[in-house]
Amino acid sequence: MAIELKDNKFHMFNDEMSYIIEISRQKDLLNSYYGARIDAEDIEIQSNLPGAFFCHADDNAPSYSLSVLAQEYPSAGASDFRSPAYEITNDKGMHTPELKYKSHELVKGKPKISGLPAVYTESDDEAETLIITAADEFYGLEVRLFYTVFEKLNVICRHAEVKNCGKSDMMLNNAQSVSLDFPAGEYEYIHLEGAWVREKHIDRNNVHKGIQGFESRRGASGHTENPFLMFFDKGTNEDYGNVYGISLVYSGNHRFIIEQEAYETVRVQAGINPFEFSFKLSEGEVFTTPEAVLVYSDSGFAKMSHTFHKLYRTRLCRGVWRDKVRPILINNWEGTYFDFTKDKLLNIADAASQIGVELFVLDDGWFGHRNDDCSSLGDWYVNEKKLGCTIAELAEEMNKRGLKFGLWFEPEMISEDSDLHREHPDWSISVPGVKPHLGRHQLILDLTRKEVREYIIGFLTDILNNANIEYVKWDMNRNITDVYSASLPFNRQGEFYHRYILGLYEILETVTSRFPNVLFEGCSGGGGRNDPGMLYYMPQNWASDDTDATERLYIQYGGSMVYPASTVGSHVSAVPNHQVGRISSLKTRGTVAMNGAFGYELDLSLLGEEELNEMKEQIKFYKENRELVITGDYYRLLNPFTSRHSAWMYVSENKKEALVYYVVKTARPSNETVYLQLKGLNPTAKYNVDGKIMTGRTLMNHGVIIDDTEYDGYCRIIRIHNI
Ligand code: GLA
């Protein structure tokens, strides 16, 4: 790993990758190259102008134009007509600054980003960081660009700091985390789109002329667009081709754009959505963008995913649970919804402890007078009338049965019908005097306000201190509307969305460090905030409210592009499935759900001995294999979006163990024989596959023959070990 400056070129590289920034004679920062390893001294600035209608950036070199040059952090209105990386307006209304290289520094390791989640290093040898300062002296503007390069992973982390070095105020109207300019070429991209109960679906597109992209305007990263982009050479697949993965470590409004302009070059940007965004910077004030994590793979999607998985599992997630296998849980939500009593819960717990479950999670409905979703959010005191005991007593009952105890919260929310709202009607987000729009009958607390943040930290601290709660499910069940904060002056209202997220991060940092042994799971109506920002505080995330096995094949396949299995909450629920009405066998449901932080979400007390025994076997199997699921390299074998079946596998780092999953999504008569070609094994090593000895190369090139009769949901798990 190294970062070198030679002949005005910063070369950030490791064995497999190069990223080159050139300081031009005119002091512009040019985004000269990003991709497989090359030698920086061999490349030159591209300077030929393909036609007329360009503006010159240097009177002495008329062919030098920012209109076509690849740039690192492009300005607006200063002769580049493509999307700018940032926009400011000064107190006179001027808004065309132009950044020029000023200085740089190199630091070992990776500096922390204050107030924001980010990838970290555990020792300074793991990475090196280049900080380039560029400035516009006339505007009194300084931008610091951060690049951290990892030694052992093809990762570059980028973010920017924008500073007002002048005397008067300026407004920052846009500040992207990353801007990249790729040379003319044929490209494609994938993003993870969806909706509630249908998150993280693969959408693959050709890059075409003009601006394309995706965004969130919801005040959360959202169900509809995950903050993640794969940009790649046309035709790239799992194993071949150049891929650039860009993942934004942010939980709020994001925007990703891909802009192919007239001369076929492509600009890619990711950052906070400029929609309704502005940030006032007074003298000396600094705005820090969230971090963008860039992963480069020279050989397809699988390698990119391996890098993200390893990085996020070990250098984004934190805390005592980071490296531990996760307890198998039973959650009562789909089993009882709001309709439960202590006895009903204990009956479920009795069955759960018999089959080997390790954690009981009490979901929504235990507080205030909440028997449906119309009331009580904000009244975080137990409904003893309903539960017949305190939370501490219930936790004790669970512990007696050998189960840990976990509890559901939706801390950011407030119901109109709540004591909290009656006491503090102004604490919710709304425009004074205008009736706010409810979502799931509820409003959202204004986390930009200190007293609101203190209240949330206060009640969580009390409850977690007063009962043996070892797991918290942190939910968030609507998106933000009626944006306005009584605490912000008129020229700071554009800061609201970002300040909300900063407020949330402050609460999460405080609560998770105050209770380091509690396992936190993020949730937002399933996958409404499945983003790296949340993973920094909570090492797992409920992937979707859709628990149907077939639907989960899509969700888990899409999510696996960037998120490691250890972070994916995944449960077996009842049939007919509550979201789509499908009936799948317990075997199929278990096979699919075992690919993450595994659990059950149904009323176990209603099941017969046969089903409970089958679950007991599933749990035994998962316990034997969960280490591999969580730490192994994940390979996608068959794509459920393009075929009628799905398959994937995990391979241990030493390639001695593997676990293969195969599921038929839709069976078809007169079917072909499936040769399931495995991946990631040692070609010459011998493996035991269900008693048969085969070499890695046979398994990877010829494949395992799946010749059983097929039906919808037919599935197999094949355990492989080196002999
Ligand atoms: C959200 C969650 C569910 C459940 C309900 C409770 O929808 O995603 O898992 O906790 O809230 O209201």
Image (cartoon, rainbow, N blue to C red):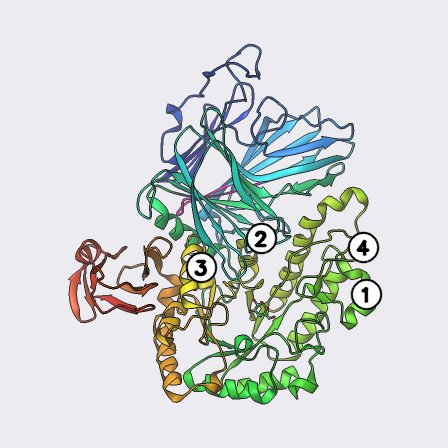
Amino acid at pointer 1: His
Q: Earlier in the sequence, mark 2 or mark 4?
A: 2
Amino acid at pointer 2: Ser
Q: Which residue is label 4 attached to?
A: 434
Position of 652 with respect to 332 (left or right) is left
Q: Earlier in the sequence, mark 3 or mark 1?
A: 1
Amino acid at pointer 4: Val
Q: Which residue occupies 25% across, 64% down?
A: 669
Q: Residue 1: tell me if it is visible.
A: no
Q: Observer-nearest residue: 537 or 349?
A: 349
Q: Which residue is label 3 attached to?
A: 555
In the image, which residues are magenta?
Answer: 148-159
Amino acid at pointer 3: Ile
Q: Which residue is label 2 attached to?
A: 221
At label 3, counting other C-alpha atoms closer than 10 Å, the crowd grade (few under 14, some 14-19, many 20 or more) is many
Q: Is mark 4 within 8 Å of ligand 1?
A: no
As helix, strand or loop, the secondary structure at mark 4 comes to loop
The nearer-to-camera label among 2 and 4 is 4
Q: Earlier in the sequence, mark 4 or mark 3?
A: 4
Q: Which residue occupies 52% across, 41% down?
A: 213
Give me the C-alpha separation between circle 4 and circle 3: 38 Å
Give me the C-alpha separation between circle 2 and circle 1: 28 Å
The nearer-to-camera label among 3 and 2 is 3
Give me the C-alpha separation between circle 4 and circle 1: 17 Å
Q: Which residue is label 1 attached to?
A: 424
As helix, strand or loop, the secondary structure at mark 3 comes to helix
Q: Residue 430: x and y, percent?
A: 77, 56
Give me the C-alpha separation between circle 2 and circle 4: 26 Å
The nearer-to-camera label among 4 and 1 is 4
Q: Residue 551: tell me if it is visible.
A: yes
